[in-house]
Image: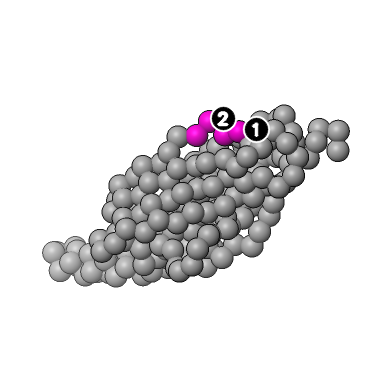
């Protein structure tokens, strides 16, 4: 299994922190309104503290879920230049062996500043690799912080360096961008 560092953990943590700060402000405002509507200050404070604890627990659970899903994933290789509004990561579920089906988990995650109105992703296998099960992804309103996952099943037919390409077309409010990402794998003969 390939392993790589996680550069998205910081972005996820930052997004969670911003969300928590916004939620805390809303809770403080709500607490002040409750106090002004005849509830005692102690009751309003108790309600506010309970809501803060729940919000903090939700934020921590979201961050832990994102980190565990991302822990064993590797960045796909972006072809071409320029910044992309998404990142593509993958994980091989086993060592690639000729003649043995292999499951690949692919995730797509928008950058914090992305405003994606539509995303289409298609997957293509290189020569020597057969793509057995793959549906294109077609998603509208893909928000920052959301993670899309796709499972691919491939069958290596020869040893050596093979790859799956993810061709991703992204529509934003102002433009359409198309990027190709490469998912490399090295297949070995079953006797190796």
> Which residue is found at the position 66% from the left and 40% from the top?
93
Q: In this view, does 152 lie above or below 25?
A: above
Q: Where is residue 90 in the image (x, y as percent from the top left)?
A: 58, 49
Asked whether 34 or 149 is in front, the reply is 149
Mark 1 sits on what residue?
155
Q: Does the magenta stretch include residue 58?
A: no
Secondary element type, mark 2: strand
> Which residue is found at the position 57% from the left and 34% from the top?
131
Task: Report the disc number at residue 132.
Answer: 2
Q: Position of residue 136 (x, y in %)?
A: 43, 38
Task: Report the disc number at residue 112.
Answer: none
Main SS of the magenta segment?
strand
Position of the C terminus, as image quadrant, is: top right
Asked whether 26 or 19 is in front, the reply is 19
The answer to whether any part of residue 55 appears in the image is no
- Around disc 2, counting alpha carbons within 10 Å, would you say few (fewer than 14), some (14 to 19), or many (20 or more)? few
**Position of 156 compared to 25: left or right?**
right
The answer to whether any part of residue 160 appears in the image is yes
Label 1 near label 2: C-beta < 8 Å? yes
**Position of 147 compared to 74: left or right?**
left
Which image quadrant is residue 76 in?
bottom right
Q: In this view, does 170 lie above or below 125?
A: below
**Position of 111 compared to 96: left or right?**
left
Residue occupying the far right of the picture: 191
Which image quadrant is residue 50 in?
bottom left
Which image quadrant is residue 7 in?
bottom right
User: Total number of numbered labels?
Assistant: 2
Residue stretch in magenta = 130-134
Whichever of labels 2 and 1 marks the residue nearer the N terminus, that label is 2
Residue occupying the far front of the picture: 127
């Amino acid at each position: 299994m390939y392993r790589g560092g996680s550069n998205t953990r910081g972005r996820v943590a930052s997004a969670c922190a911003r969300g928590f700060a916004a939620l805390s402000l809303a809770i403080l405002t709500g607490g002040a309104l409750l106090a002004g509507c005849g509830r005692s200050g102690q009751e309003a404070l108790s309600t506010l503290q309970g809501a803060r604890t729940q919000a903090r627990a939700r934020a921590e659970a979201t961050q832990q879920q994102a980190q565990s899903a991302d822990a064993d994933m590797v960045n796909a290789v972006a072809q071409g230049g320029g910044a992309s509004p998404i990142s593509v990561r993958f994980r091989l579920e086993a060592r690639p062996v000729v003649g043995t089906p292999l499951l690949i988990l692919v995730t797509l995650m928008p950058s914090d500043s992305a405003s994606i109105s539509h995303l289409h992703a298609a997957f293509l296998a290189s020569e020597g690799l057969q793509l057995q099960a793959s549906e294109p992804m077609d998603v509208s309103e893909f928000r920052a912080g959301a993670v899309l996952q796709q499972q691919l099943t491939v069958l290596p037919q020869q040893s050596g360096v093979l790859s799956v390409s993810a061709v991703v077309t992204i529509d934003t409010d102002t433009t359409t961008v198309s990027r190709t990402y490469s998912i490399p794998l090295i297949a070995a003969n079953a006797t190796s």
